[in-house]
Each structure stands twice: as structure tokens, then as C-alpha cells.
Image (cartoon, grey):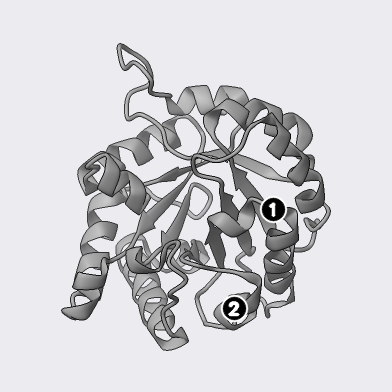
């Protein structure tokens, strides 16, 4: 069984006061239910580890190098040292705002693995690419370019986030989500073998909220969600976690 994963990406939001939300979020995390991951700003990682009992804590990015003259950056080893076990890589906002390429995301993923972190590698198409029916070509290229050789289900999670659905309130149809998730599963199996491909978790992200979570989690090959704004408050995130816990498990 692939254990479901509810991942919250706090992005550039949150100060120490926001950590109070972790208590409510942790209350929804059960040993036999979905794994719950919170990725706060780097300034809050150590404090979140101390406060978020029962939660996995991750970073939102890391540098491809282990150390060096890279002012303002943070290495995977530093995230690990702060208590993180995951790191989000290749998010569309990093690709757009910082010009990150598939090749750079691949280097960062390798660095995360070397540090003992699980990489949540993000892929997704823009609205223009969707309109021109290039979605699967784009996703296929991102998967090939962003994920290094040697992937295992323990150290890789793939998150499909259509860029046009992030923070817009627009959500693909369940058929559209299913098409991409099935495609990702097939590509992972073809490249890494059936064992790795079938056991690697694939998350959906893009305007996931309590009102649509149940419908999204019923789609085959959707193993959870990467949630942005709705993960900032326990009142919004807990119903999503509960919907994921209620979803039928998938082998």
C-alpha cells in the first residue's frame, strides 16, 4: 500500500505565532492514517520540529551544493540538521520567479537524496501549454529532466501542480487530473521499474480545499495533495486531511 500524504506548503507565510496552528493539524494525524507534512519557511523549521509532534517537517527549497559561498541559500544538509525530513523542489513558483530549469531541479534532488531527505519534485503545465494540448509532453519532459537516476519510493514523491490552478481557484476536471496522474505512474514504472513506479506517491496540487478534496482523492493514482493557502490554518487543512484519511487505499 502507498501511504497517503497530505503536504502543506506555507510558502513565504508565517512567523512564530503561526506555529500554534500545528497543534490542531497534528490532532488530525493518526498512526494508521495519511502522513502529514508541513513545509514552513526555513526560519521556522527547527521550531516546527519541536512543536509539531506527529508531523513530518520539510523545507521549501535547497541549494544544489552542500556548502559554499552562496549567500542567502540553504543546503539540504542544513535542512536535515534543522530536523527536516522532506524538501519541495522544482515548484512552479521557483521555476518562474528564479528561472529554475529541469537540470537544476535534478541537481537539487540529488543533493537532497545525498543529505537523506525525501524530495517532493513538482511538475506542471501552464495554461497556454494546456490550451495547446502539450500537457503530457511538458510533464514527460519535466519528469525526465528533473528526477535523477536511482529514484526509490522512499526518497521521491512527485507532485503534479498545473500552474494555472495554483492559487487561482481553478481546478482541472477529475478526468484531466486522472490522465496526468496515470501518465506519471506509467512513466515512473517505465523508467524505474514496476516496484518503484507503483510504490512512489503522486500528489495533486492546485487550489485543493475542503470542498473539493473528497472528489480529487477519489481519482486513481492520486496519493494525496500538496496544499498551499489552505494548509496555513488548521480549520482549513484538517478537513482535507480527514478527506484523505477517508479515501480508499490504493495498492
- As drawn, is 145 to the left or to the right of 73? left
Residue found at x 83% / y 53%: 27
Residue 251 visible? The answer is no
Residue found at x 37% / y 16%: 67
Residue at image mark 2: 212
Asked if disc 2 and disc 1 are in contact, CB closer than 8 Å, the reply is no
x and y percent of residue 69 in the render? Answer: 30, 11
x and y percent of residue 219 in the render? Answer: 53, 82
* Residue located farthest toward the bottom when viewing the structure as drawn: 175
Q: Compare residues 129 and 81 and report the one nearer the observer.
A: 129
Q: So how many labels did they put on this image?
A: 2
Q: Quadrant of residue 49?
A: top right
Pair 2/1: label in front: 1
Secondary structure state at the residue bearing disc 2: helix
- As drawn, is 166 to the left or to the right of 230? left
Q: Compare residues 103 and 150 and report the one nearer the observer.
A: 103
Q: Compare residues 68 and 48 and report the one nearer the observer.
A: 48
Secondary structure state at the residue bearing disc 1: loop
- As drawn, is 145 to the left or to the right of 179? left
- Look at the image and tell me in which quarter the N terminus lies: bottom right
Label 1: how many residues lie within 10 Å, few (<14), some (14-19) or many (20+)? Answer: some
Residue found at x 42% / y 69%: 194
Q: Quadrant of residue 113?
A: top left
x and y percent of residue 13 in the render? Answer: 55, 41
In the rendered view, tell whether residue 203 sits above or below residue 73. Answer: below
Badge 2 or badge 1: first in the primary sequence: 2
Residue at image mark 1: 233
Amino acid at each position: 500500500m502507498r501511504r497517503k500524504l497530505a503536504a502543506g506548503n506555507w510558502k513565504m507565510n508565517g512567523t512564530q505565532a503561526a506555529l500554534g496552528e500545528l497543534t490542531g493539524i497534528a490532532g488530525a494525524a493518526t498512526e494508521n492514517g495519511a502522513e502529514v507534512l508541513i513545509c514552513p519557511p526555513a526560519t521556522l523549521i527547527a521550531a516546527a520540529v519541536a512543536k509539531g509532534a506527529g508531523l513530518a517537517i520539510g523545507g521549501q527549497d535547497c541549494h544544489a551544493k552542500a556548502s559554499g559561498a552562496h549567500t542567502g541559500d540553504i543546503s539540504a544538509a542544513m535542512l536535515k540538521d534543522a530536523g527536516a525530513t522532506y524538501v519541495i523542489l522544482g515548484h512552479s513558483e521557483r521555476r518562474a520567479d528564479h528561472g529554475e530549469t529541469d537540470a537544476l531541479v535534478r541537481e537539487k534532488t540529488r543533493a537532497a537524496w545525498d543529505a537523506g531527505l525525501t524530495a517532493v519534485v513538482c511538475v506542471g503545465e501552464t495554461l497556454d501549454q494546456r490550451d495547446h494540448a502539450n500537457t503530457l509532453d511538458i510533464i514527460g519532459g519535466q519528469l525526465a529532466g528533473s528526477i535523477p537516476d536511482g529514484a526509490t519510493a522512499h526518497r521521491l514523491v512527485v507532485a503534479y501542480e498545473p500552474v494555472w490552478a495554483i492559487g487561482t481557484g481553478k481546478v482541472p476536471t477529475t478526468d484531466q487530473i486522472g490522465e496526468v496522474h496515470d501518465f506519471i505512474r506509467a512513466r515512473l514504472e517505465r523508467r524505474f521499474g514496476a516496484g518503484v513506479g507503483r510504490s512512489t506517491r503522486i500528489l495533486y496540487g492546485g487550489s485543493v480545499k475542503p470542498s473539493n478534496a473528497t472528489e480529487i482523492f477519489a481519482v486513481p493514482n492520486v496519493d494525496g495533495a500538496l496544499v498551499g493557502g489552505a494548509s496555513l490554518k488548521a480549520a482549513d487543512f484538517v478537513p482535507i486531511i480527514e478527506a484523505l484519511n477517508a479515501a480508499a487505499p490504493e495498492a
